[in-house]
Each structure stands twice: as C-alpha cells, then as structure tokens.
Amino acid sequence: GDFKVGVVHGHQIVPWGDSTALVKFAGRLGVDILISGHTHRMSIVELGGKFLINPGSVTGACNSVGEFDITPSFMLMAVEGPSVVLYTYELKEGQTEPEVKRHELKRP
C-alpha cells in the first residue's frame, strides 16, 4: 500500500528527538513516515505503527546543544511497491569512504 510521508525540521517538537513526541506529531499529520532532523543524529525508529526517520547531518556539524561527536550521514529513500527502502550513508571516523546500509521498512 501507499505510504504517507511527512517532513519537519524538528526544532518544533519538544523534547528534541524524543520518539514519543515525534510519534504524536506523525499522528497529528496523519503520516506513516515522519522525516525529522534538528539533532543531526541519524536514526531509524519504528514506534506506534509509525516510522521515524532522521537522516542526520551530511557535514557532521555540531547540533544545537553543542554536541560535537556527530557522525556525518545522509539517507536516500526509495518506495518499492509495498515497502520503503532507506539507503544510509555514514562516514565513520578514520574512513575515507562512507559505510552504506540498506534498510527495508514494511508496515507492521
């Protein structure tokens, strides 16, 4: 089936990066997948029948609370029939090439 996707920067949702608050926001938007940011930390969380996606920060810049241990990352999302595939890219310390992983999201 079709997925409804919402996008929000994330600074409006307090506490920042909180999965419970993000699920509630996704519910208010009526979306299956919520893409948010602000924390600069990559994550993929399934909670309450929703997928919470944070692509991170492609530059690895520090976040708004001054955390400097941010791993540079980004994601590509592809809808493939009844599933969504996320390709995550992370440049870990000391590496010259990003680590690429494939994650498949399916409805619960």
Image (cartoon, grey):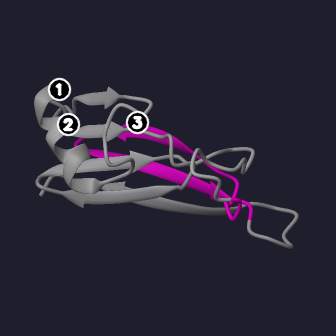
In which quadrant will I find the N terminus?
A: top left
Q: Are marks 3 and 1 in contact (CB under 8 Å)?
A: no
**In the figure, residue 89 lies in which quadrant?**
bottom right
Q: Is residue 42 visible?
A: yes
Q: What is the three-letter code of the residue carrying label 1? A: Leu
Task: Identify the residue at horizontal 25%, vertical 44% (top origin).
Answer: 22
Choose the circle earlier in sequence order: 3 or 1: 3
* Residue 80 in view of the camera: no
Please state if 32 lies on the left or on the right of 42 as rendered.
Answer: left
C-alpha span from label 3 to label 1: 14 Å
Mark 1 — residue?
29
- Quarter of the image holding residue 100? bottom right
Residue placed under numbered mark 3 in the picture: 10
Decide which of tag 3 and tag 2 comes sooner along the chain. Answer: 3
Span of residues in magenta? 68-91
Q: Are the residues flagged by discs 3 and 2 in contact, CB closer than 8 Å?
A: no
Category of crowding for the residue at label 1, using alpha-carbon neighbours closer than 10 angstroms: few (below 14), some (14–19), many (at least 20): some
Q: Overall secondary structure of the magenta stretch?
A: strand
Measured as percent of width and height from the top left, residue 28 is found at 12, 29
Q: Amino acid at mark 3?
A: Gly
Query: Compared with residue 95, is residue 37 higher up or lower down, i.e. above or below?
Result: above
Cα distance, mark 3 to mark 2? 12 Å
Disc 3 packing (10 Å; few <14; some 14–19; many ≥20): some
**Mark 2 vs 1: CB contact within 8 A:** yes
Q: Is residue 90 magenta?
A: yes
The residue where tag 2 is placed is: 26
